[in-house]
Amino acid sequence: MDTSYGRDAAGDYNNDNSSYTYNYNYDDYYELSSEEEAADAISRYVAPFLLFTGLAGNVLSLLVHVRLGRAHMSTCYYLAVLSVVDSLLLVHRLGSDWARHAFKTDLQAAVQNRSELTCQLFNLATSFLLHFSHWLLAVAVLDVALARARPKRVDKICRRPERVKNVTLTVVLFLVLVNAHFFWTYGLMSAVQYSDELFCTFTSKGGSYADVFRHRIWPVMDLVVASALPDAFIMASVVYIWRRRRDDVTTTSSRDVNITSARDVHHVARTCVALGVAAVLLTLPENAYSVFEFLCENHVYKVDNTDLTALARRILGQTVCFTCHDIFIAGKVLFYIACWPRFRSCAVEVIKCTNEKRQRNRSDRKCTSNQASRR
């Protein structure tokens, strides 16, 4: 949602020609065009709505998936971790916009510009979370496809939490290695010569190779790791699950509630298929915009940077494209509710338990206050 950045949270400073890419600020004192007003409205009203509803939905999803993971499928553990990661993504992608409009402060810049280490860690963490979110969903869909591939071993496949830990740690290690370049490609620099004000940006420590990496190598790596590879796994798994949708899933005949039922596997598969297709479709606009920016930066597609009308349209286009991704991050709970009956029943139980605990706490407080007044 933050229209001043692409995938990286830092700004962009070209040290060779001392040009500083201006970060667009909605609070600047000049008349906004219709495109800029539309982007401003999305940032002011849509962003906080998605932020708070998405956080509430992800917290509910986390509580439900932890319960279901203990009793039914290991896939729920992937979805539980995904809820945590997506909550952090919402705070990063939408929280800065909301704070800038509500409190007139740029928290993101304050964190990044504090020191060179925070600059590097912040950009590494935000890039890692964006990659990790998509890969977790891909792994969850692959887990369901594996269960559908071996229907007679569903109980053994779905009741192995140690595999979830191993796969998750492997993905984390892979993505950390991919994003480790932030430690030597990002740092604090001055926008104006002989100025004490520093800001977090891509540095030119590696000379000409650093510029090649920034403008040509990393955008391709980012697009492949963040979208192309996980999307390929998701769509391949979705097609496989769809082709095996009529196959019977054999489970152990037992009254133990911890045994995964065929109906549970079917509902989880249906949910993961819906999530996978929605993820690919709703992240497609953001990926398309990233390709457009890549072509513009490398002068394959020439644009006039002095044309304010074209700049306003790019701002609106970027805002809309990023909002599509934010809608998916914030609205996953709707897919769970619509496609997964056991999730609905468990969510109702969680909400009831939460309300009962609140009532008990209130009654306990009243009792203690009454006892104190009597004394």
Image (cartoon, rainbow, N blue to C red):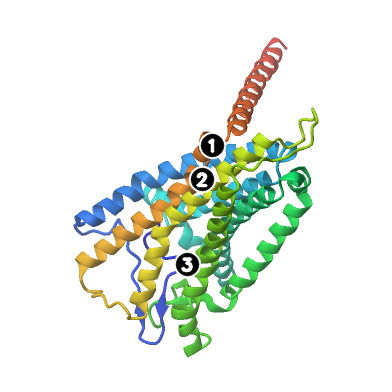
Q: Amino acid at mark 3?
A: Asp
- Which quadrant of the rendered structure holds the N terminus? bottom left
What residue lies at 78% left-to-right and 52% top-to-bottom? 162
Q: Which residue is at the front of the view, 100 or 205?
A: 205
User: Label 3: how many residues lie within 10 Å, few (<14), some (14-19) or many (20+)?
Assistant: some
- SS type, badge 1: helix
Q: Which residue is at the front of the view, 133 or 111?
A: 133
**Picture mark count:** 3
What residue lies at 61% left-to-right and 55% top-to-bottom? 136
User: Label 2: how many residues lie within 10 Å, few (<14), some (14-19) or many (20+)?
Assistant: some
Q: Is residue 39 left or right of residue 193?
A: left
Q: Which residue is at the front of the view, 79 or 309?
A: 79
Looking at the image, is 153 positioned above or below residue 115? above
Looking at the image, is 242 positioned above or below residue 189? above
User: Label 1: how many residues lie within 10 Å, few (<14), some (14-19) or many (20+)?
Assistant: many
Which residue is denoted by mark 1 in the rendering? 339
- Disc 1 vs disc 3: Cβ atoms closer than 8 Å? no
In space, the residues marked 2 and 1 are separated at their CA atoms by 8 Å
Which residue is denoted by mark 2 in the rendering? 274
Residue 310: quarter of image? bottom left
Which residue is denoted by mark 3 in the rendering? 8
Looking at the image, is 247 positioned above or below residue 217? above
Looking at the image, is 55 positioned above or below residue 295? above
- Disc 2 vs disc 1: Cβ atoms closer than 8 Å? yes
Measured as percent of width and height from the top left, residue 121 is found at 59, 66
Q: Earlier in the sequence, mark 1 or mark 3?
A: 3
Q: Amino acid at mark 1?
A: Cys
Measured as percent of width and height from the top left, residue 198 is found at 46, 73
- SS type, badge 3: loop
In space, the residues marked 3 and 2 are separated at their CA atoms by 29 Å
Q: Earlier in the sequence, mark 2 or mark 1?
A: 2
Residue 126 visible: no
